[in-house]
Image (tube, rainbow, N blue to C red):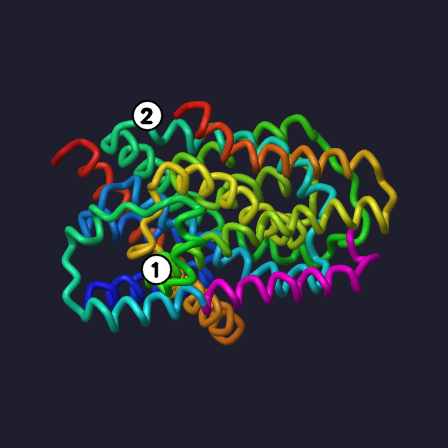
Amino acid sequence: VIIFYLFITGLIAGCIGALLGLGGGVIVIPVLTILFHLPIQIAIGVSLIGVIATSTGAAIVQVREGKSDLRLGMLLELGTTIGAVAGAVMAGYISSKALCLLYSALLAYNSYSMYHRNEASSEEDAMNSNQDMTSYELKNIPGGMFYSTLAGVLSGLLGVGGGLIKVPAMYLLMGVPLKIATATSNLMIGITAATSASVYYLNGRINPLVSVPVALGVFCGALAGSWINTRISTRMIKKIFVFVLAYISLQMAGKGLGW
Amino acid sequence: LNRSFVSENKIMGSILAWIAGFGVALMTSGMYLFLLKKGYSISMSDLSTFKFGGFRQTVAGLTALDPLLLMTMGIITFLFAPFIRVVGAIWIFAVKEKDSTYVWISCGVLLIMFSGFIIRQVLG
């Protein structure tokens, strides 16, 4: 029965992740730590496998469509993979409480950026439809590398994909069209997560009994979410989730502070 | 942009699909065998205390159809997919694009990815 609950957790996380453009980890980690009372280090390992599963599924489609910028992706991955190894090693030395607090801060930022994106989405949609997708000049490459490295550290430390940092860095800082930035971020996420996950795997922090049902759920949920996404408006769900994420952030902060 | 090498991307997409399919098959069969052997009597302590072996033990366990090692091999297969993506990028830059700068950049990425395995050995 527990395995069935874990599968359902992954299914919901994958579906919501695909609907809202979030990584499944944002839901998986709080559920595993708050409801299943698993150590956050194990939850992070599970989340990384979920991230790889989602990213591989998305890559199968996106690589064929050729939407991602392979050169940009590989260039930024130099920083991201270094950050991912550093973050994954650091996670072994940081206490569970500190990780919960860091995760709480990440969720609060996620909630804020989702609120901000909701407000600005119609204006951005109009802008993006006018953007040239075939030629663009990259700006501020050092700045992009810095934020990519930071995204890698967060991926290794907290088991997230890091798209929340990479996409705005590419779009706002480097002048990459949003659709290409999103596809390139998806290409990068799997590579980053695999780098972090290899450290977690060798440290015995990836538990197959938990990871497998969650990863299978996330994989199926992400497929279902992508299918639903093209058929319904996600504006209202996004508004609700701004508050859900803020609430989970408070719960994780409470866990970190030992309340 | 990589729109100019669509045929290579299709090959890469197919390879990734096969890897993902193989990983899902291993995970599902491992999970099915586990539930058959162990039944549904799994407690929360089983989940949090379990530790699994390294790569060699996992490969050896495959022949014995050990459910947990089958699941672990499924996870390793998924871990392997992004490595293939980087190898594919190196091949595209080396053979199709003949762009040595990006061949070196991609090789650097692959090296850092593998360093995750070495760093663990160094740090113990």
Residue A172 lies in the magenta-colored region: no
- Mark drawn on residue A214: 1
Which secondary structure class fits the magenta region best? helix
Residue B65 image offset from top left, x and y in percent: 37, 65
Q: What's the amino acid at mark 1?
A: Val
Residue at left offset 44%, top offset 59%: B74
Element type where label 1 sits in the image: helix
For residue A91, what is the image quadrant?
Answer: top left
**Residue corresponding to mark 2:** A93
Disc 1 to disc 2, C-alpha distance: 26 Å
Q: Between residues A230 and A78, which one lies in front from this camera angle?
A: A78
In the orientation shown, which residue stands out farthest toward the top?
B123
| Above/below status of B21 relative to A155 | below
Say whether residue B109 is left or right of residue A90. Answer: right
Counting residues from the N terminus, which is met first, the one under dot 1 or under dot 2?
2
Report in which chain the residue with disc 2 lies.
A
The foreground one among A71 and A19 is: A71
Q: Please provide the residue range marked out in magenta.
A: B1-25
Q: Position of residue A139 (x, y in %)?
A: 73, 33
Q: Is residue A55 left or right of residue A35?
A: right
* Chain for numbered disc 1: A
- Measured from the top left, where is residue A93 in percent x and y? 32, 25
Q: Is residue A50 visible?
A: no
> Tag 2: Cα neighbours inside 10 Å, few (<14), some, or many (≥20)?
few
Left or right of B6, for residue A158? left
Would residue B73 appear left or right of A141 to someone viewing this image? left
Which residue does the image show at 42% across and 54% down from the upper left? B60
